[in-house]
Image: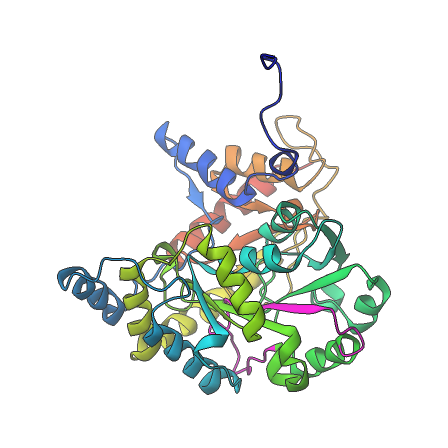
Amino acid sequence: MACSKSMNRLSNRVQQIQPSATLAITAKAAEMRAAGRSVISLSVGEPDFETPEAAREAGIAAINSGFTRYTAVAGIPELRRAIAEKFKRDNHLDYDANDILVSSGGKQCIYNLLMAVINPGDQAIIPAPYWVSYPDMVKLAEGEPVIVETSAAADFKITAAQLESVLTPACKVLFLNSPSNPTGMAYSADELRAIGDVVRNVPNLIVATDDMYEKIIFDGKTFATFAEINPDLKEQTVTLNGVSKAYCMTGWRIGFCGGPADLIKAMTKIQGQSTSNPNAIAQKAALAALTGPTDALQTMVATYQTRRSWLVEAINAIPGMHAITPDGAFYVFPSISGWLGKTTADGRTLDDDVVVCEWLLEEAGVALVPGTAFGSPGHVRFSYAVSQATLEDAVRRIAATADTIR
């Protein structure tokens, strides 16, 4: 029998998820630029520094030497060894090469993990604000995201008591992102220790600790990761990281993780049936980045700290906005509660953060991401991975536009 032309050809799975709000805002800004508008984008989470020279040269050398073939699915041995050494040196975590998986970006590591451990109906605990992709990737794995709201008063971090209150037998994964996208806040060793005291009583719970912004931390603070603080829970932890942010290699698409060998083996199996190995050339570049000099990284972090301090002060000088000071990353996540419900000069009511971002893009020519995309309505995300001059221009435009609110 012939299929009906009206039959929906899309899966229930794909219809549950939403496109990335960050990419949608970026696309709208690009359209406006193409139409001749002056637009400043503070919406993209991408460093504005160059990939380290050693990594670039290693990529070129890989091409010239013909290193352009398939590699092992989990990554080349020398890169996996270098990652294990990085975990030992920076995080006091003992992994060997069989405990390491290299993927096409940090996002694929997370996706592999969820596909390897989530069954239909299993739950994943996601503190909000969260990185935009966590809930939708859980849904793609046919799991249920359990969103736990946090507040600025708690520095946008889940507490041990909150975690304990939402745990059920169906909970399979807990996400921890530190420093956070979108808030920039980082968990202290004491906070991770308290969360560990709860996790210790739930042996089936896997902690997915997303440390992508590990190296971008300010004010002399010491970064801590979950398994480092709770070494007895290492077998319940997958430590996720990559070269995208610290080494300005977003387009190279190299993420990595360390975890229990049986789980890494399962994740490698998933990867083997989806993308297979990550890009061979990019692996060589990542190897050079991880083993090369760190002078550029130190300069970048110092620059971001200066921008952060300036931006928080500038935001807090705008009536109706309020930001707390982030610990790291390159984002500020202010509340715009003082604007909501008010009217603009053109008669528009600022009903929510999505409307506010649309208004600022159209009237001020500044692209921000609404907090709703991160599970925290009433906020907006600024990325300060732009030049200081660009940042100052953007804030001037926003302040002038905000003056028209009635």
Give the residue displayed 66% in from the left and 34% down from the top: 12
Please provide percent x and percent y for residue 194: 76, 80
- With 203 as the anchor, is 217 left or right in this view? left
Q: Say whether residue 319 is visible.
A: no
Of 166 and 320, which appears nearest the observer? 166
* Figure check: 3 above or below 70: above
Residue 327 falls in which quadrant of the image? bottom right
Please provide percent x and percent y for residue 214: 51, 73
Locate the C terminus and report the quarter of the image it occupies.
Answer: top right
- With 43 as the anchor, is 375 left or right in this view? right
Specify start and end residues of the magenta stretch as a single range.
Answer: 200-225
Give the residue displayed 67% in from the left and 85% down from the top: 232
Which residue in the rendered view is the most extreme toward the front?
A: 1
Please provide percent x and percent y for residue 132: 59, 50
Q: Main secondary structure of the magenta part?
A: loop
Q: Say whether residue 97 is visible.
A: yes
Q: How is the image coloured?
A: rainbow
